[in-house]
């Protein structure tokens, strides 16, 4: 079955540590996205990518970084510069911009 | 600036009690109105896309409709398994990325 796989499901970060969230898709989609979801705030866009080796900042990119070396993969690194990283992180993909997005089941990041 | 507002924030229904969720949007040139369902601890699941005013889509007990300013998700005779958060998003000609509303949390009591 085609879909998006996010791992791990739960992640804990220590002070000063960088952590990387994995996102892999086998839908052959060009566009991929990272969102942060906090209670009562809806989905906020962190980064997005239309093609391999190209990505753009979203509304809340500070403290985060991404790479897009393969079409199937779009990992997100939460750096130590992100002072409030506790949230539910969602990865999505679509066949193009302004097309329906398909989401993974998220990674919940907490601070130790 | 593109804006999407969903109401109500939360809705409690008895099983079988039909109702509607609202999604009001202000975007520059609608390129698609998307509805999603999200269960706790899961990612959103795509339900419908609507492109033009007057368009309707149906799936089981759900029907989505679209006007020039808002979209409605009608739930007919809901069951407890319809309990979830429903998200809408509007794609515009001014942005590559759809703008999401904050969602409506629906609870259906047996």
Image: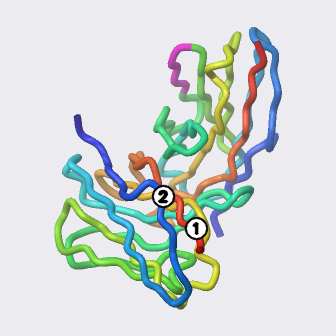
Residue B8, image quadrant: top right
Label 2 – label 1 distance at C-alpha: 8 Å
Q: Residue at x 46, y 79 (%)?
A: A78
Q: Is residue B79 above or below residue B94?
A: above
| Residue A34 picture location, percent across and down | 44, 65
| Residue A110 picture location, percent across and down | 58, 68
| Residue B9 picture location, percent across and down | 80, 44
Residue that label 1 marks:
A110
| Residue B31 picture location, percent across and down | 47, 51
Asked whether A75 falls inside the magenta stretch, the response is no
Q: For this view, does A43 lie left or right of residue A104?
A: right
Q: Is residue B89 above or below residue A32?
A: above
Residue that label 2 marks:
A10
Q: Is residue A9 above or below residue A87?
A: above
Q: For this view, does B21 lie left or right of residue A103?
A: right
Name the dominant secondary structure of the magenta segment: strand
Q: For this view, does A107 lie left or right of residue B23?
A: left
Mark seen at residue B61: none
**Residues at marks 2 and 1 touching, judged by CB atoms closer than 8 Å:** yes
Magenta highlight range: B56-60
């Amino acid at each position: 079955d085609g879909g998006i796989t996010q791992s791990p499901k739960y992640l804990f970060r220590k002070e000063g540590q960088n952590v990387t969230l994995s996102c892999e898709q086998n839908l052959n989609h060009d566009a991929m996205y990272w969102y942060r979801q906090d209670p009562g705030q809806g989905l906020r866009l962190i980064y997005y990518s239309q093609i391999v080796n190209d990505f753009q900042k979203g509304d809340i990119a500070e403290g985060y970084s991404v790479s897009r070396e393969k079409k199937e993969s779009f990992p997100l690194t939460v750096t130590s510069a992100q002072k409030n990283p506790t949230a539910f992180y969602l990865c999505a993909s679509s066949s193009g911009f302004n097309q329906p997005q398909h989401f993974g089941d998220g990674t919940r990041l907490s601070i130790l | 600036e593109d804006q999407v507002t969903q109401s109500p924030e939360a809705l409690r229904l008895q099983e079988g009690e039909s109702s509607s969720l609202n999604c009001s949007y202000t975007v520059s040139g609608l390129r698609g109105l998307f509805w999603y369902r999200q269960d706790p601890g899961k990612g959103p699941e795509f339900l419908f896309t609507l492109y033009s005013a007057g368009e309707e889509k149906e799936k089981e007990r759900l029907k989505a409709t679209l006007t020039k300013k808002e979209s409605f998700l009608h739930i007919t005779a809901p069951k407890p398994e319809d309990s979830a958060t429903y998200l809408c998003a509007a794609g515009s000609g001014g942005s590559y990325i759809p703008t999401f509303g904050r969602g409506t949390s629906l609870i259906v009591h047996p």
